[in-house]
Amino acid sequence: MRKFYQCFGTIILLVSIFSCQKRAEKPLPDLAPEFTAVLEAHGNWKKWHQAKAESYAMIHEGVLVEENAFINLDSRKIRLSNSEFEMGYDGNQTWISPNREAYKGQSLKFYHNLYFYFFNIPFVFTDPGVTVEKVEDRRLNGKEYPTFQATFEPTIGSSPKDQYFMLINPDTNRLEYLLYTVTFFGNENPPLSALKYEDYRSADGVYFPRILTGYTFENDSTKTLRYQVSFADPLLLDEEFDAEVFEKPKNGIFAD
């Protein structure tokens, strides 16, 4: 594990050097002005859109397990590393090392990019195939929030029927709560869950939440605390990580 992190230190240094070179920029998506204003409240969102890779550290509060994530943003290849396992997606399949039993959850395919997606909302809603529109305001814990809904084309992702509602703080115009459903496991009428976004911090001009807290949701209120994660050292890079970063280790297995 230590050799792996040392290797990543070298990779990030090399990427920082090469990122100074000019490269063609991706065209910006055609977005509704109200959603663009939300993105701009989260800092230089165009930098996220143009970035090629991202890394961050995440701590599962309560159990105090630190997890490091490395992602190529265009392909969404990802590698997660913690004291229990290495997990990743190589562009075709999910894998885990040293064995399937190292991850106690139900599905690698569901988990491997779960927190990446949450952490990068609203930026990921600029992806092709995602439509964001302003809908009726929603009330949560007695407060009224301007609300945007994200919907997906049928071919986007592994569960395009999921619902996402962004509840925006009316003072800062930043995301404060996300209401979402999970259809991945076959429930055709899943309940809404709530995720609170707190303590935004700048990563070179792009603002990410430091804390995400998940709750059950009932009668327009947050109820039972389900989980909490905190983030540190988010980094956006102008060049992709090498493909080998995302390849299954020799002692790993492909699994869903």
Image (cartoon, rainbow, N blue to C red):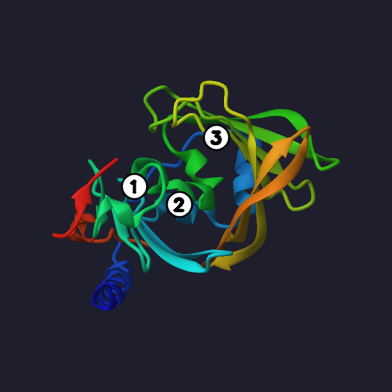
Q: Which residue is mark 2?
A: 116
Q: Marks 1 and 2, Cα distance to the nearest angstrom?
A: 10 Å
Residue identified by numbered label 3:
31
C-alpha span from label 2 to label 3:
22 Å
Q: Residue at x 71, y 48 (%)?
A: 173
Q: Is residue 80 above or below residue 146?
A: below
Does 244 appear above or below 163?
A: below
Q: From the viewer's perspective, tell me whether residue 163 is left or right of residue 129.
A: right
Q: Amino acid at mark 2?
A: Phe
**In screen coordinates, is 193 left or right of 95?**
right
Q: Is residue 204 visible?
A: no
Q: Amino acid at mark 1?
A: Arg
Alpha-carbon span between mark 1 and mark 3: 22 Å
N-term-proximal mark, 2 vs 3: 3
Tell me the residue at 47%/47% (across/down). Answer: 117
User: Of label 1 and label 2, which has the lower sequence position?
Assistant: 1
Q: Amino acid at mark 3?
A: Leu
Q: Which mark is residue 76?
A: 1
Give yes or no for contact between labels 2 and 3 (Cβ–Cβ under 8 Å): no
Report if the CB atoms under discs 1 and 3 are less than 8 Å apart.
Answer: no
What x and y, as percent, mark residue 40?
61, 50
For mark 3, give the secondary structure. Answer: loop
* 1 or 3: mark nearer the eye: 1
